[in-house]
Amino acid sequence: QVQLVESGGGLVQAGGSLRLSCAASGRTFSGYKMGWFRQPPGKEREFVAAISWSGSSTYYPDSVKGRFTISRDNAKNTVHLQMNSLKPEDTAVYYCAVEQRPNTWGHWGQGTQVTVSS
């Protein structure tokens, strides 16, 4: 059974940093684009970052560009999200996912809560 498990969330003050991890089990996703998404309280889920299968290309929305860095280790079947200069508006449940087809994401994990206090 395919499973993605996120970890690394927590409570941090504004300006602080967190590093999220996503571990995949059940199969390898080394040939797929991987991504991070988040769902703030009372809002819809939104795109945060993505990385190509090789790791050579990364994608970010303007809201996190320059502050967040996505990386992957295909040998360990893991994806990471380094989050720096965190802001209260980054508060959300963060999820990782696999791009199963272009712009179609699946195998969602259970999410990890990130709370940034002002």
Image (cartoon, grey):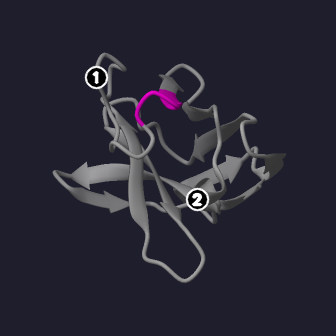
| Residue 77, x across and y down, in percent | 55, 31
Q: Is residue 101 left or right of residue 79?
A: left
Range of magenta residues: 65-70
Residue with the most extreme front position = 118
Magenta stretch containing residue 12, yes or no? no
- Residue sitting at x 72%, y 34%: 17
Element assignment for label 1: loop
Residue 89 bears which disc, if any?
2
Q: CA distance from mark 1 to mark 2?
A: 26 Å
Element assignment for label 2: helix
Between circles 1 and 2, the one closer to the viewer is 2
Residue with the most extreme bottom position = 42
Q: Residues within 10 Å of mark 2 (few under 14, many from 20)?
A: some
Between 36 and 101, the residue placed more toward the observer is 36
Between 11 and 109, the residue placed more toward the observer is 11
Q: Amino acid at mark 2?
A: Glu
Between 14 and 18, the residue placed more toward the observer is 14
Q: Amino acid at mark 1?
A: Ser
Q: Is residue 95 left or right of residue 50?
A: right
| Image quarter hosting the N terminus | bottom right
Q: Is residue 74 above or below residue 91?
A: above
- Residue sitting at x 35%, y 38%: 60
Instruction: Report which residue position mark 1 lands on.
Output: 57
